[in-house]
Image (cartoon, grey):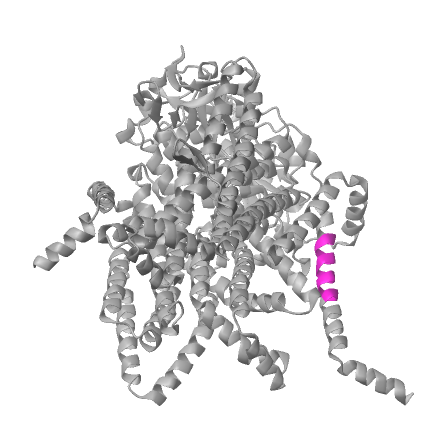
Amino acid sequence: MNSIVDKLYVLSRSQKFRNLIIQFIFLIFVGLFVYYLISKALQLDITLGHFVSRAGFGISHTFIVDYTSNDSRWFAYFTGVVNTIRMCIVGIILATILGTIMGVARLSKNILFSTISYLYVEILRNTPLLIQIIFWQIVFLQLPRISEAITFKDTVVISNRGILLPYASSTENGYGNLWIGIILIAIIASLFLSFYINKREDIHGKVIKLYNFKLSGNIIGLIIFFTIASISFFILQKPYDIDLPSLYQNDKGTYLQSGGFEFTPEFGAILFALVMYTGTFITEIVRGSIQSLPKGQTEAALAIGLSNYQTMTLIILPQALRSIIPPLTNQYLNLTKNSSLSVVIAYPELFMVSRTIMNNSGHALPVFFLILVTYLSLSLVISIVMNILNRRVTRIGA
Amino acid sequence: MKTFRFMFILLSVMSIGLFSACGSDAETITETVEVIKEVEVEKPSTLQTVINRGTLKCGVNDNLTGFGVLTAAGTFEGFDVDYCKAVAAAILGDASKVEYVPLTASARFEALGAGEIDLLIRNTTWTASRDRDLANDFTATTFYDGQGMMVYADSGYQTIEDMDGATVCVLQGTTTELNLDDRFTSAGLNYTPLTFETNDPLQAAFEEKRCDGWTTDKSGLASKRAEFPDSAGGPAALTVLAETLSKEPLGPLTRDNDSEFYDVVQWVVFGLIQAEESGITSGNVAAMAANPSDPGMARLLGVPFSGGEVADFQFGVDPKFIQNAIAAVGNYGEIYERHLTPLGLTRSGSLNAQWTDGGLIYAPPFR
Amino acid sequence: MQNFYKWGFETFFGSVFNTIITLLSLIILFFFINSILGFISTSEWKVVEVNRRLLLIGRMPPEHEYRVWPILWVASYLIMASIKTWGSPSYKDLLFIALGITIVCVIFTTSSTYLWVLTSLLICIFSYVITSFIGKSTTANNKNKKILILLWILLLPIIFTILLIGDGPKPTLWGGFLLNIILACIAIGFGFPLGILFAIGRASTLPAIKIVCTIYIETIRGAPLVAWLLLAWFVLPKFLPQFWGINEVSVVVRAMIILSAFTSAYTAEVIRGGLQSIPKGQIEAADSLNLGYANKMILIVLPQAIRVVIPALISTFIGVFKDTSLVFILALTDLLQVGRIIPEQDPEFFGRQLEALCVVAFLFWIISISLSNLSKKVEKSLGIGIR
């Protein structure tokens, strides 16, 4: 009898046992909470069955996908997702470029240049993004109206309905997709080839020479790519054509735009706002990383005769990149999430489309989970890409 | 790296949940729901809640001149807002006991369903799906509206058919968005909808001719047209096309299965209409109540006729509730005159004239 | 003088690259200044002038307006005293603060409120003077610090008492800038302690606690704030228990719940960074002293972890403050929402959205920039980032 009590006492004093008990109690509470949530959720309609029904509303910006109001709500949602992805990709690239330039500018000895960067960061970082989005919408609407649109020799049309640029479009012969496939293969092949040649040069010191002119892997890759691309282009009877934008009036007087790549004011406003806003944070990240490098790096680079520009691009930025990438990933994720603010001006990305679906169907909860899962997947993809990049960058240094 | 693995696991668990929700047996869920519903306690009626609370929570528009707009003093005014006041006056005896909740078009039904508001009067169209699917009850029609299309006068558009290829500005979360698509698709017309969450960016876009047309209820269009600034050409620069894309009867909504409150709201609406028919105004209501000219009027105002009994309809509120409402905001005609006539919405000859003048404004008898 | 010219030439036209940059910068600056001047010369501020009250306190009824001023007094006393005590401001900082206060006063003083504004100004000056007087003696200064910290902690309860005591206006009537500030204070006030808990939970060695905290943090961070606010609007009322009388729980409270949850997840991530930066020796030392888990955390780990991440924390808080403008999705009339709807009151205000937006942006900016300067000061005084 006594021995059991003793054993229990010893057991109760053991760290492991206590940890187990704490976790057990904790899990019970969490479990109760989750059970409560689920039981409440079951009272609501949590199926997504209504997503197969006809959407019934139009979407103004469709990119790649060909959506009409007769398609299902799933397809409408998908159109929204494509719009979000498009916004994110363009936004991330531009924000990175802007942020890097401004981050370098912030540390420039040229006072004018660093002042611009300073003003840019201090003004835009400290005002809500929503204000900036509305501001850019108003700015883009100040472009000439469509009846007074500016046209440059049928190549560019500028109005507040959108800026139209020349773009490629597939011709009638139907080899368009085949050519795209060939191009993709060509890109991969030439990348592999150039990697291989570069490696050979690095490790074995073997160099391919043509009349005393050294051919590096990059050049060979480019040559091969362009050869394959152009030869297949002509073999497939020119599957792509340059598509010039045009602006005309139909017999009722409606101005119609066709062809070309359309850059609408809504897309522009969101893009500008997101890029400018995220750019300020990237600026600060870049600046911080550069400042954290030892000063000796710059001095040594200058001492061996590199120019300011070369010092920056060859010595400083590659090193700074290592500490830049993790916080940069965070900013990319923020940009993705912030793109949901397009809901205020008419850019139909996934959040806006799902809001419309919520309104039309009246079932908010399942749509909300769908939104959550979509954003989580987007975040995951960005994290994966950035992690791979991070590993590469840190390995180069090591 | 660890974060990343967690996110992945989290994501997969969620997706599994989601897809099982997609494919799950609807019947099991319904059964569970029924079991849980049985356990739930009876909710108190909204009418009792309002009386106990002492204020009426009313969902309104804050952005539509004539129907509901937020003034610089921080108060609301408009046609719909007056109905809030009337209901408050009827139930609580004081038209100022209203808590206004400004709502966007896309958030209004959830606000009502969630109990955020007691009464929704936000130029809301009576449709079958809203009545049934969204668990609301429409009480009565206060304004017969129709969806219209506003275009610039110099565009030369005469009918919707002319608008092939046009860009149209429209508000999100409205029946208008769906009607617009129905109309254009069935006529085989191409169009680009620019869908906005709120009115202010929409208006900015229309003013800069970002869109060829602006579609919403005709009353809304009339109000926007009336206040179109002279610097941009004034009201004459705009035309509202003659075609009505859809029927849009607007009126107050209550929650489903809330008949006590529903009845009060419904009969306040009818009472104000009846008051106009009987010639009772906010100015003469006190005199009329003191000395009603006929038994019908006495029933309406909740006063005894020549020393007889007061006809109490057992609404659960003061029998004089219609009288209070009229005293607070006036009869239907007065409300209309105050808010909608200045916008250029002429009443005579429209659907919103009294039935005696050939309109649809008609109250069932108070008996 | 010769040197000056030489310096100028070298910085601006030292190389071809530099010359291009200088010219580009000049073009950008010219464009920027030109458009600002163009805007100022054509702007009309009547839309703001008429709606100043709406912008600041929203739909708060006039009879309750007096409640706002004591809050402003307490806040201005606290802010100025704290600036003096911890900020050790230079003349440049003081000039900046004075300028900010002046602009705000110029925008928002009307004939009916000038006495109130004047009182607040006097309190600002009084608090600064008296704190610098106290600061001369070390013991008094230490006591003063303690009082100030206590007051900061009590600030939220004080605000709520003043706003709600004796039949105050309903939370749904709070609006304008007041609402943004209240929401931000609540979100930070509740989100920060919660965030600490979640950060500790995530760094815990107990797998169950760790996993649950991680799921919470990553889920909240996974979706945008607007989506979460939408959840508050659509779904939250259906999940809160009936006996809380959710029908009476206002949408403002729901916004507070969501914003706090959101803030807690983000601060937890920041603090986790701080926890990771603590050398293992510190924890081992605490263990060898046989401190309990709570003592170890409160006395040893957290103070160091939080100290390291103060700048990051402040920028998270700035983010939260800016994000309070998203409550428009809950149909709350916050500052930005007011700024967006007032141009529609009157045809006279046609095309005056920019003026309204400007004032709104300025108000957000002045608070955020003050906080971000504070964070820089803290960074400097803690010696973070200097190697």
> Which residue is drawn at the image coordinates 35% and 33% (left, top)?
A141
- Work out whether residue C367 can be spotted: no
C279 to A168, vertically: above or below: below
- Whether C90 is among the magenta residues is no
A78 to A282, vertically: above or below: above
C252 to B118, vertically: above or below: below
C349 to B43, vertically: above or below: above
- Which quarter shows the C terminus of chain C? bottom left
Number of residue marks: 0
- Whether A37 is among the magenta residues is yes
Rendered location of residue B65, percent (x, y): 40, 37
**A325, B235: nearer the viewer:** A325
On screen, residue A364 versus residue B286, left or right, reads right
Rendered location of residue A78, percent (x, y): 59, 34
Rendered location of residue C238, percent (x, y): 65, 51
Based on the displayed image, in which of its 4 quarters is residue C97 positioned?
A: bottom left
Rendered location of residue B41, percent (x, y): 74, 55
Based on the displayed image, in which of its 4 quarters is residue C112 positioned?
A: bottom left
- Residue at the far top: name it: A251
On screen, residue A23 versus residue A338, left or right, reads right
- Work out whether residue A272 can be spotted: yes
- Which quarter shows the N terminus of chain C? bottom left
**B300, A182: nearer the viewer:** A182
> Which residue is drawn at the image coordinates 45% and 55% (left, top)?
A324
Q: Which residues are magenta?
A: A27-39
> Which residue is drawn at the image coordinates 38% and 38% (left, top)?
A137
What kind of secondary structure does the magenta stretch mostly adopt? helix
> Which residue is drawn at the image coordinates 62% and 65% (left, top)?
C202
**B88, C18: nearer the viewer:** C18
